[in-house]
Amino acid sequence: MGRYVPPDLEGTTSGNRLNAKRAPGTLRKDGTQTVRFEMPFAVWCHTCAPHAIIGQGVRFNAEKKKIGYYYSTPIWQFRLKHAACGGSIEIKTDPKETAYVVVEGGKARDYGEGKHRQGEGGREILTPAERERRREDAFAALEGKVKEKEAVKDNAKRIEELYRSRERDWEDPGNVNNRLRESFRRDRKIYQREERAVESLKVRIGTDMEILPEMEQDAQRAKLVAFEKGSSVSTKTSGSFLRTPARTSSRTPISKSRNVSGQKSETKKDALRRQLVNSTRAAMNPFG
């Protein structure tokens, strides 16, 4: 707050020092200080007769003092003077409820139903609809937690069963090893027999293309293919594509480079593919 300073003393001292006054906000020896306080809500002044209301946002010079702690948060007390009647009103902070509480000289205004207002201990009073909604949310959250606990129990039970089955299966490592080796020998013979059959098929049709294992989709696609009775390809030409690789390789001179032999094998693949496409009638190209 600015104070009058005579022109002859201006610049040499301050108004507070000249009038022996403390500047607002200066901490005194008793731990109090004067601050500018604004009403957080409307308050009824009990000193006024009849009781008068002080609107929200009205500002006062209040005496601020620390009166305690809520855990590590300080609790502040504000004591202000109502200029209309000269009565004092005391307000303190409530860190637990994050609110202000009127302690002395007045009472917080009641805003009616459907509004947040102060009840006993500074708690808000809920409407029936709000109370019912919070109750339903609490039951829904509790039900979700119960389901999560049941799922955790089922998963723990399943994990324990897996551990027990593993310990039971591997109780005798020697027997497990014998079973694994026996199944590997049996499967190895099957794989070798299938590999020999594939190599024999490659030799019969005279191709070096990789032949994949038969699948159910292949059988379904084969049913959609119908070979024409009269093919435009001559027997001599078709027979040239069905020669085995042994006969073809025997006629190839040894002096020719690998590049030339690779080009010939590629040409044979393309020719065989064209012949099969021209001799079949299907809904789609089997090589597409």
Image (spheres, rainbow, N blue to C red):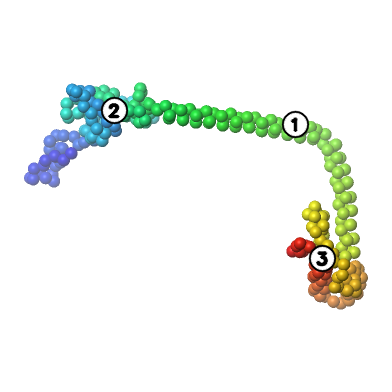
Q: CA distance from mark 3 to mark 1?
A: 58 Å
User: SS at mark 1?
Assistant: helix
Residue at horizontal 83%, vertical 68%?
279
Closer mark to the observer between disc 3 and disc 2? 3
Residue 155 point in image, percent of width and height: 66, 33
Q: Are marks 3 and 1 in contact (CB under 8 Å)?
A: no
- Precedes in sequence: disc 3 or disc 1: 1
- Residue type, mark 1 in image: Arg
Q: Is residue 190 above or below residue 245?
A: above
Residue 128 point in image, percent of width and height: 42, 27
Q: Is disc 2 surrounded by few (<14), some (14 to 19) or many (20+) residues within 10 Å?
A: some
Describe residue 142's horizontal placement relative to residue 208 as left or right: left
- Precedes in sequence: disc 3 or disc 2: 2
Describe residue 132's horizontal placement relative to residue 178 as left or right: left
Quick check: can you spot residue 262? no
Residue 266 point in image, percent of width and height: 80, 70
- Outermost residue on the front side: it is 229
Residue 126 is labelled as none
User: SS at mark 3?
Assistant: strand
Q: Which of the pair 53/47 is nearer the observer?
A: 53
Q: CA distance from mark 1 to mark 2?
A: 69 Å
Residue at horizontal 82%, vertical 57%?
223
- Precedes in sequence: disc 1 or disc 2: 2
Q: Are marks 1 and 2 in contact (CB under 8 Å)?
A: no
Residue 280 is labelled as 3
Q: Is disc 3 surrounded by few (<14), some (14 to 19) or many (20+) residues within 10 Å?
A: some
Q: Which residue is mark 1?
A: 164
Q: Which residue is mark 2?
A: 109
- Residue type, mark 3 in image: Thr
